[in-house]
Image (cartoon, rainbow, N blue to C red):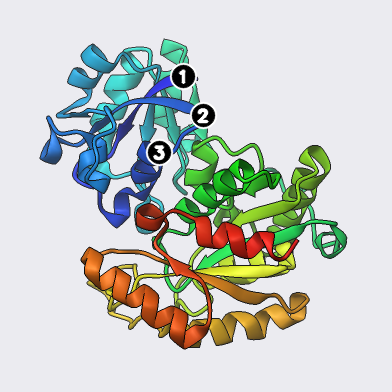
Amino acid sequence: MERAVILCDGYFGQNTGKTANGLVRYSKRYQIVGVIDHTKAGRDAGEVLDGKANGIPIFKDFREALEKGKPQTLVLGVATFGGYIPKEFRPPIREAIENGVSIAAGLHEFLNDDPEFKALAAKHGVTLLDVRKPRDIREAQQFSDKTRRLPCLRIPVLGTDGAIGKRTLALLLTDGLNAAGVKTTFVATGQTGLLQGSPYGVPLDSIQGDFMVGELEAEIVRAYEETKPQVIIVEGQGSISHPAYVCGTRSIVMASMPSGIIMMHAPARKTRNFRRDVVAWPMPKPEEEIQWLEFYAKVAGGGKVIAIGLNHENMTREQVEATVKEYEAKYGLPTADALWHGVGKFVDRIQGML
């Protein structure tokens, strides 16, 4: 595993820093040796993110990260609105390349399309990795209706908003099922999951519309053919009710032909996760999202919502516990916060479907 430091200056622990947040919690591709964020320098990344130290330091700048972390790769740890490279990130990116450190990113603005970075990387012999860059359309797959016939459960983790914890729950659930003796494979659909090291998946929101379903479907089929799992967990994107991020969820439903759906929700979140300085769009109620998901899933075989995952954003432990009781009584679905409660309820629910 390459030693990597994450550039997330000014954003770590926030929704914009979700790529850094994810890599700090879980990475099979890189050994994370630090995070760069001058606003939280000197602290432990795990303590900032989850209140529990994990030994990953936060550095004030790239120079300190280079001296103390000795990284081989600098990962851009942000998911900016529009997928742009922040202008303030350009100096540390240049500094990293000049010091022989490769760059990895998952943004829509590709490193390899930037004349300055591309020339500098060639001069210093380092790699620029754009995980969000889809393959050529002449190689891309179109819908073929293959997943419906796979002899395994297909469980996408969807949600009521973007940046709400779908990928985190999906990864924890994959590990939990495997630990319980249920062979399970994870399929990524976004930049963070790919940067974390998933061998299966596509950068869904970078793929042209004609190929979104087919490309993801092909990866789900490949995941089954190569690993023969009992369960395939598919990472969700956006929300079927989100005004700006609707295509991801619909494509994932059609590509996975779900046996069941786990839905993530943040009870204390009032407005959608996107540019609130432009428009504040209200969050849906859980029952509304369940209705919409199940209505759309009818076309794909009729998979139902089988459990609810909670995001404890802006909630106390007591509020989360009360919400768990409320939702289980109201919706009749196992409910838990994976980061606080673990994924045992979800594992039990899926085992009961086998």
Q: Is residue 23 above or below residue 211?
A: above
Q: Is residue 320 above or below residue 152?
A: below
For the residues labelled 3 and 2, say whether their Cβ atoms are less than 8 Å apart. Answer: no
Residue 139 appearing in the image: no
Q: Amino acid at mark 2?
A: Arg
In the image, 141 versus 148, the foreground residue is 148
Which residue bears the numbered disc 3? Answer: 23
Measured in 3D between alpha carbons, the distance from the residue under mark 3 to the one under mark 1, in whole angstroms, is 13 Å
Measured in 3D between alpha carbons, the distance from the residue under mark 3 to the one under mark 2, in whole angstroms, is 9 Å
Residue 29's label in the rendered image is: 2
Where's residue 66, x and y in %? 26, 16
Q: Does residue 8 appear left or right of residue 113 in this picture?
A: left
Residue 288 appearing in the image: yes
**First of labels 3, 2 by sequence position:** 3
Where's residue 337, x and y in %? 39, 62
Measured in 3D between alpha carbons, the distance from the residue under mark 1 to the one under mark 2, in whole angstroms, is 7 Å
Secondary structure beneath label 3: helix
**First of labels 1, 2 by sequence position:** 1
Residue 10's label in the rendered image is: none
Q: Amino acid at mark 3?
A: Leu
Q: Residue at x 45, y 87 (%)?
A: 330
Q: Does residue 3 appear left or right of residue 202 in this picture?
A: left
Which residue bears the numbered disc 1? Answer: 2
Q: Amino acid at mark 1?
A: Glu
Q: Is residue 9 above or below residue 300?
A: above
Label 3 neighbourhood size at 10 Å, few (<14), some (14-19), many (20+)?
many
Where's residue 199, x and y in %? 64, 37
For the residues labelled 1 and 2, say whether their Cβ atoms are less than 8 Å apart. Answer: yes
Q: Quadrant of residue 236?
A: bottom right
